[in-house]
Image (cartoon, rainbow, N blue to C red):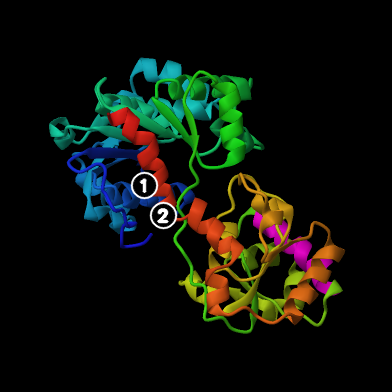
């Protein structure tokens, strides 16, 4: 995330303390969202305390050595007050835990194990001295700790991070759980029960927002896109780039592009950045060998890729949730050729973005690629003022995120 907070003419929460409650995870999407929350609340003038909740037994806060690996992996959190929450071993050996949590879990109940572990957590002793004004909780299963910190006084904002019961069902596919398997409905009921205890529900993409508004119509909901750090709008270069990390949806999209689109534009050379190369090689070694020279592998600074490119491709054919790489490409301001699915989860019409061409089948995608490759590359100034960059600034930037949080939290704090 950016080292500098978003500029505000007035910092609306001076002297306020915000507790950001989150799973003790790192190197994942949730952790990046948490970093954005820290930056935003700091930009708004609040003091931030982070509370990392472990879903593993034995991670008591006073056992500082057991948290060393996590602390080492999350150095960004050291700039603010840090606290921890974790269940002692005796709690998970208690008969009630074995009966009410562990037994359903061995039947695949992913919801009960996460909330059940965190509900039995001990908290860092210094949290007892904190006067919390807002609790910003991430994931429904961290709500037991959020409620303890709120003490019936502070308001709780809950970031849902997708419909978790749906993700749990996908995770359970092929797992050797005991029968009968925990149902989607059972896990969803637990998720919704914890969510009802929050004062406001925040959702990271339009699909998630729509789903929870229907499931919990009595609650206050807000669509709040996660903040995505800006990438450079130039100076530009000669490369046509495709940026993609390794996951199933990204690998499927890359395979479609290489099998169906690339042969239709044989004169075009594309540089593919990111860890998707290993996924392509595992899925189709002959295809990987054919395009081996296109793969640049993982890079430490993705900003340099966008700064030195002239055209970005988003051949997205599958995936759920908001696509961060799509937002990054929008922020670059360069011309884009993309499928409609690349813009899933966004409450905007990509057809209105002038520096973007949508193409949902291989023939049209290849034609758009050839046309864009032959066009004059935009200047840095043109990229900076482009439609996609303006859309990024208005909806997905760190400043936009902080302003959205301020609008939601101000009436709650009073």
Split into 4 quadrants, where in the image is the N terminus? bottom left
Q: Where residue 56 sits in the image (x, y, percent)?
A: 37, 37
Residue behind mark 2: 398
- Compared to 191, does 174 lie above or below? below
Residue in view at x 24 percent, y 54 percent: 78
Q: Where residue 200 sits in the image (x, y, percent)?
A: 42, 28
Q: Where residue 334 sits in the image (x, y, percent)?
A: 61, 71
Near mark 2 (Cα within 10 A), the count class, few <14, some 14-19 or many ≥20, is many
Near mark 1 (Cα within 10 A), the count class, few <14, some 14-19 or many ≥20, is many
Q: Is residue 97 left or right of residue 376?
A: left
Question: Which of label 1 and label 2 is nearer to you?
Answer: 2
Residue in view at x 56 percent, y 24 percent: 188
Task: Depth check: give the residue in front, 399 or 106.
Answer: 399
Q: Earlier in the sequence, mark 1 or mark 2?
A: 1
Task: Depth check: give the residue in front, 270 or 88.
Answer: 270
In the rendered image, residue 182 lying in the magenta stretch gets the answer: no
Task: Depth check: give the residue in front, 291 or 318.
Answer: 318
Q: Where residue 81 sits in the image (x, y, percent)?
A: 20, 47
The outermost residue toward the left is: 129
Q: Residue 37, labelled with which disc? A: 1
In the rendered image, residue 250 lying in the magenta stretch gets the answer: yes
Residue in view at x 49 percent, y 34 percent: 222
Could one spot residue 356 in this view of the protein?
Answer: yes
Image quadrant where residue 345 sits = top right
Split into 4 quadrants, where in the image is the C terminus? top left
The answer for how far apart the CA atoms under marks 1 and 2 are is 9 Å
- Compared to 34, does 184 lie above or below? above
Q: Which residues are magenta?
A: 249-263
Q: Secondary structure at mark 1?
A: helix
Image quadrant where residue 128 sits = top left
Q: Secondary structure at mark 2?
A: helix
Residue in view at x 53 percent, y 57 percent: 392
């Amino acid at each position: 995330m950016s080292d500098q907070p978003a500029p505000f003419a007035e910092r609306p929460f001076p002297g306020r303390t915000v507790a950001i409650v989150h799973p003790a995870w790192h190197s994942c999407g949730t952790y990046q969202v948490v970093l954005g929350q820290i930056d935003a609340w700091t930009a708004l003038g609040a003091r931030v305390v982070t509370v990392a909740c472990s879903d593993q037994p034995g991670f008591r806060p006073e056992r500082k050595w057991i948290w060393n690996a996590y602390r080492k992996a999350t150095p960004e959190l050291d700039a603010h007050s840090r606290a921890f929450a974790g269940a002692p071993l005796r709690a998970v050996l208690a008969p009630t835990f074995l009966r009410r949590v562990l037994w359903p879990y061995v039947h695949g109940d992913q919801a009960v194990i996460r909330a059940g572990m965190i509900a039995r957590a001990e908290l860092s002793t210094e949290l007892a001295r904190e006067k919390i004004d807002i609790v910003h909780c991430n994931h429904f299963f961290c709500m037991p700790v959020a409620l303890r910190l709120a003490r019936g006084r502070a308001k709780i904002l809950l970031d849902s991070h997708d419909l978790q019961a749906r993700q749990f069902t996908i995770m359970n596919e092929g797992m050797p759980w005991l029968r009968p398997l925990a149902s989607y409905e059972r896990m969803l009921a637990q998720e919704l029960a914890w969510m009802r205890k929050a004062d406001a529900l925040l959702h990271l993409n339009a699909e998630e927002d729509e789903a929870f508004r229907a499931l919990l119509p009595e609650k206050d909901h807000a669509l709040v896109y996660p903040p995505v750090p800006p990438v450079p709008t130039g100076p530009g270069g000669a490369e046509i780039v495709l940026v993609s990390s390794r996951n199933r949806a990204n690998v499927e999209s890359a395979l479609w592009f290489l099998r169906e689109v690339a042969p239709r534009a044989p004169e075009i050379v594309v540089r593919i950045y990111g860890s998707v190369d290993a996924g392509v090689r595992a899925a189709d070694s002959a295809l990987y060998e054919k395009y081996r020279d296109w793969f640049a592998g993982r890079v430490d600074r993705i900003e340099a890729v966008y700064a030195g490119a002239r055209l970005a491709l988003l051949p997205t054919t599958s995936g759920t949730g908001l696509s961060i790489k799509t937002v990054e490409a929008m922020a670059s301001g360069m011309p884009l050729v993309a499928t409609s699915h690349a813009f899933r989860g966004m409450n905007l019409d990509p057809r209105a973005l002038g520096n973007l061409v949508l193409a949902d089948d291989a023939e049209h995608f290849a034609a758009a690629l050839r046309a864009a490759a032959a066009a004059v590359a935009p200047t840095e100034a043109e990229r900076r003022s482009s439609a996609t960059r303006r859309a990024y600034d208005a909806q997905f930037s760190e400043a936009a995120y902080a302003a959205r949080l301020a609008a939601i939290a101000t009436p709650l704090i009073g």
